[in-house]
Image: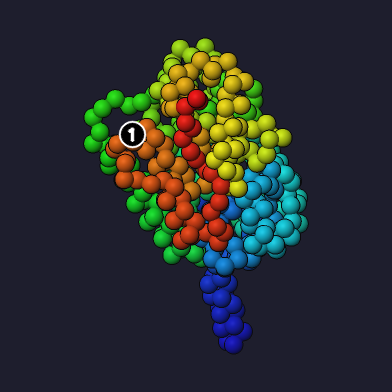
Amino acid sequence: MLFVCACFLLVLSSAALAKRVTDIDGNQVEIPDHPQRIVLGESRMLYTLALLEPGDPFRHIIGWPRDLLKYDSQTWNSFARHFPQMLKIPSLGNGGPNAINPEQILALRPDVVILPSLARYDDADVRLVSMLKAAHVPVVKIDLRVHLLQNTRRSVEIFGEVLNQQARAQAFNRFYDAHMQVIRQRLADFQGRKPTVLLQLHLGRRNECCVTAVNGSLGELLTLAGGENIAGKTQHGVFGRLSEEAVIAAQPDYYFATGFGANDAQGLLKLGPDVAPDAVVRSFRQLTAQQNGLRELTALRNGHSAVLWMNFYLSPWHVAATEFMAKTLYPQLFADIDPQQTLETLFRDFLPIPYSGTLFMNIPPAQ
């Protein structure tokens, strides 16, 4: 009888140590109630992790790729200065989740692996998930990079559930909702013409015009902000490409470019943490002068140009970027909104590192 009771208590104890989380794909995933060994499918999930995990955001992270170092060395270095233990996290390569070797993850014996939803999947992505599930490793999917308007809030909730930081997730989502709802409400009541916009991703990354986002990613945020995306009539996926001829013919009212360059050697638009505004303007002028299609745009000559940090597309910090786009397109309608203050408040109230640099700005007309 005592043996039966002991077994029963053991079962109860085991059940109490597990919980079910419904991920962004609708999968019910059983994970430990307090996971101690977490692998992230990309280190740029730190943008969200740091919002939710007070104190030391790295205490349960046992592996990740170093995409953050590759695509945002400024933020990587800032966190490393404040949390040097971050540098000891085992690296799973320098790319994204599709470059991870599944055997590396299995060798770390994770309690749970958190993977991002992607706009496109290849065989490596499918193989990674299949091998993890075959080894009975819980896999939780979140979406902070594809359908931002639909999935950001829920993905923050899921991340909070995994970390047992539900209250932090709810607090951030209240902040997020309050700011996004102002944009929705004011534009819902607006009766005027929507300004047309060319959104070019990764200015300087390719010496050609123009990779853009339409039905997802930053394209969704542009639509919410009241912009008429000139790619919307011909491009139907998350991402697309416009020819120079199409861009010149469209003559958009506004030109928005994204970038994340940290230094001139990269040949990218300098933008992000630790980058001063004058450096952003110099970089912008140099790079746009190299592309024939952009030189022909009146928007660049009349001061209707703006830049945004590319990594907003996989960070809930994009709430401030959406405000910035809305205010740029409708300065009178959003005269009382201060996107920079929103961003600095987000850092002050939710993040363990100080704000620095330039994550968005309007480019003045050339003299």
Look at the picture and state if 254 lies above or below 132.
Answer: above
What x and y, as percent, mark residue 222? 42, 34
Please provide percent x and percent y for residue 202: 59, 31
Residue at left 55%, top 51%? 356
Q: Nearer the viewer, residue 296 or 237?
A: 296
Tell me if residue 230 comes above or below residue 327 in the rendering.
above
Disc 1 residue type (three-letter): Tyr
In-image side of 14 versus 94 (left or right): left
Secondary structure of the residue carrying tag 1 is loop
Can see residue 285? yes
**Residue visible at 34% across and 36% down in the picture:** 331
Image-based side of 51 in relation to 113, left or right: left
User: Which sits in the foreground, 114 or 218?
Assistant: 218
Residue 131 shows in this picture: no
Which residue is pictured at 74% across the width and 46% down the height? 93
**Viewed as shown, does residue 231 lie left or right of 280?**
left
* Image location of residue 42, percent across then percent down: 63, 48
Q: Residue furthest front?
A: 367
- Locate the N terminus and report the quarter of the image it occupies: bottom right
Q: Which residue is mark 1?
A: 330
